[in-house]
Image (cartoon, grey):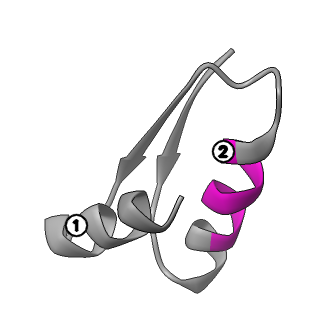
Amino acid sequence: MRIGLIGTGRIGTFHAEVLSRHPAVDALLLADAAPERAAGAAART
């Protein structure tokens, strides 16, 4: 399953961390109005 997540604030980052551990998720795309925030969330997942 491929998932796109828009918004990497506190709640979005939480969801990204949970989804990144789910065995059915093959790809997780993160997007945010602030690219550096999306990159930071991606680095933590």
Residue 7 tag number: none
Q: Where is residue 27 in the image (x, y as percent from the top left)?
A: 53, 25
Q: Where is residue 45 in the image (x, y as percent from the top left)?
A: 54, 58
Residue 36 horizontal side relative to residue 10, left or right: left
Residue 6 horizontal side relative to residue 43, left or right: right
Residue 20 tag number: 2
Q: Position of residue 7 (x, y in %)?
A: 45, 64
Dot 1: what SS?
loop
Residue 26 image-quadrant placement: top right
Amino acid type at circle 1 is Ala
* Prevailing secondary structure of the magenta residues: helix
Q: Which of 6 and 14 is in front in this view?
A: 14
Query: Relative to residue 31, is residue 35 depicted above or below?
Result: below
Answer few, some or many: residues within 10 Å of disc 1's Cα (few below 14, many 20 plus, some between 14 and 19).
few
Q: Where is residue 44 in the image (x, y as percent from the top left)?
A: 48, 68
First-in-chain label (1 vs 2): 2
What's the magenta region?
14-20
Q: Nearer the viewer, residue 32 or 16?
A: 16
Answer few, some or many: residues within 10 Å of disc 2's Cα (few below 14, many 20 plus, some between 14 and 19).
some
Dot 2: what SS?
helix
User: Residue placed at 65% from the left, 77% from the top?
Assistant: 11
Task: Work out which quarter of the rendered image holds the N terminus and state it.
Answer: top right
User: Residue placed at 16% from the left, 64% from the top?
Assistant: 35
Query: Relative to residue 38, is residue 3 depicted above or below?
Result: above
Amino acid type at circle 2 is Ser
Residue 33 tag number: 1
Query: Relative to residue 27, is residue 21 depicted above or below?
Result: below
- The question of residue 6 being in magenta is answered with no
User: Residue placed at 66% from the left, 60% from the top?
Assistant: 17
User: Residue placed at 58% from the left, 68% from the top?
Assistant: 12
Q: Give me the C-alpha separation between circle 1 and circle 2.
A: 21 Å
